[in-house]
Amino acid sequence: MSEARIDVQVEHKHAPPADQKRHPNTCPKCGSHYRDDELAAALWVCGHCDHHFPMRARARIDWYVDPGSFVEEAAEVRSEDPLDFFDLRPYAERLAEAELNTGLGEAAVIGHATMDGHPIELSVMDFTFMGGSMGSAVGEKFSRACDSAIERGVPLVSVTSSGGARMQEGILSLMQLPKTVCAVEDLHDAHIPMFTVMAHPTTAGVLASFASLGDVTIAEPGALIAFTGPRVVQQTTREKLPEDFGLAEQNLRFGHLDAIVPRSEQRQQLVKLLRLFA
Amino acid sequence: MTEKDQELNLRRRLSGLSRLPLLRGTRVEGEAERLEKQLERLKADTSDEAIWRSVELARHPDRPYTMDYVARFIDDWVELHGDRGRADDGALVTGLGSLEGRTIVLIGHQKGRDVKERLDRQFGMAYPEGYGKAMRVMEIAERFGFPVISLVDTPGAYPGVAAEQHGQGGAIARSQAEMARLTVPTIACVIGEGGSGGAIAIAVSDRVLMQENAIYSVITPEGCAAILWRDAGEAKKAAAAFKPDALHCLELGVIDGVVAEPEGGAQTDHDEAARLLRAALLECLEELEDTPGEELRRRRRAKFRGMGVFA
């Protein structure tokens, strides 16, 4: 492994151009460009082609809950660096930068609120914080959301958006899978319903734990929902990938979702569920 | 954490371990000694070579696999095939057998010895059907009160198109949930590679052990290197950074004990490796057997819910 490696990359004459840096407000599907306020007013959905842009956790909470009803919980929980992890940069530095850039303490926000008058507990992930990855702090926050839902006897609404377990916390991140699964089992035992909304992307460790255990599971259109993403599948197995591989639409067809619900209709759908489970 | 802290931590953990019933008895004395030796080695060998040695030994082609252990210490073995839905997954073996007169359910990854068997068993990477089969036999265990023993040895769950379409993520989640519900004693031991979700799917157990040279990790060193260093060739650096070896897992509170291996690694003497593993499994079983099922479940959930380090 240590000897010099020969670069065997081949350049193709007609290869598609390498990923160009696209402005975050430009639709990757149809190229339409929007001002910030336009996107916010449209719930970050492209008015032209219906592409769902990523939605920040706080914006989503504002959209879901009754105005002023959200009370954040466990806001003080932060990640630590138990492994002194250092890749190209120290983990501690990555954490600090993520907090500065996102204004969030971690990749999940939890708290209680009311939704059309129904009291609920909320756990919402934010992909912009280190790819929504789950380390000890995210696992702890989600688990506390379960406990809080049990304590209040109210349903849990969980929105997932994550690249998976956070590598920088090594095996402790893997242990957040059984940790959150056990928290959901406690929720099930207490007969508290959990509604899961899978946003783009819900993958790997988060899909393989609490995200898959909701009583009702809905997804956003076009969301990538896969244990192993298309790039890794392609690289390891050299299989030819189906057109909509790993997308919400394929997951619905294969029976892994209850429904695909556009963002503008999600609130209505959740309120309906809250009424039915009340 | 400085090296000094780390060493202190490890020592504290070791002394705590020697109080555990799990590590009582003469065999365990030997194990504690071995751990001490490992600790010495860790101190002497501050380079990351020791960790990489574990990675290499954990993947050694002559290392004993699940079926080698079954042949050596499970009597009346009856393999159970198929998930009753779609397929039989050769990467995950399940069955009933007898361990010192007790009927147990055994679930284990199986890698395969030669090229043909390796291909048939997908190198120990299970499909959702494999985890479906595991859940099916866990239900049998629950119904009849048989303890569940899991032997973990997988690079990870199979990363293919069909596996995704059949619901790999959901299968791993539900398998863990099933284990969190069981009211029978459950013991898992990582006997080689404990790769990510594919491993934890069958390792939500009352007691989780690792063989001395096994590894347990959130991603393969190559996968981590490819993502964080953008170069799979940096696997050694990645392994050194996320520390998948048994000693570090013990230190982080992820596992409950380390099972000694014959000098030089399990691949040098399958019989001796099996003897040591069998003794460790029996000790755990004896310790868990008298605890009521509800209490086992409560403690198991409390253990996993307590995992993680945060501020």
Image (cartoon, rainbow, N blue to C red):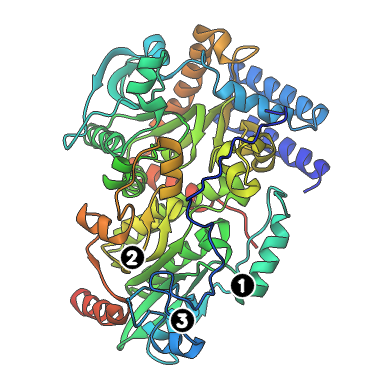
Asked whether the viewer can see residue B42, the reply is yes
- Dividing the picture into quadrants, the one containing residue A64 is bottom left
Q: Position of residue B15 (x, y in %)?
A: 70, 34
Residue at image location 48% in from the left, 48% down from the top: B304
Q: Amino acid at mark 3?
A: His
Mark 3 to mark 1: distance in Å?
37 Å
Label 3: chain letter: A
Q: Amino acid at mark 2?
A: Gly
Q: Residues within 10 Å of mark 2 (few under 14, many from 20)?
A: many
Residue at image location 26% in from the left, 44% down from the top: B166
Q: Which mark is residue A76?
A: 1
Position of residue B52 relative to residue A29, above or below, is: above
Q: Residues within 10 Å of mark 3 (few under 14, many from 20)?
A: some
Q: Earlier in the sequence, mark 2 or mark 3?
A: 3
Q: Amino acid at mark 1?
A: Glu
Q: Position of residue B28 (x, y in %)?
A: 60, 20
Q: Earlier in the sequence, mark 3 or mark 1?
A: 3
Q: Which residue is mark 3?
A: A33
Q: Is residue B287 left or right of residue B228?
A: left
Please state which of the two labelled residues, at mark 2 or mark 3, is closer to the viewer.
3
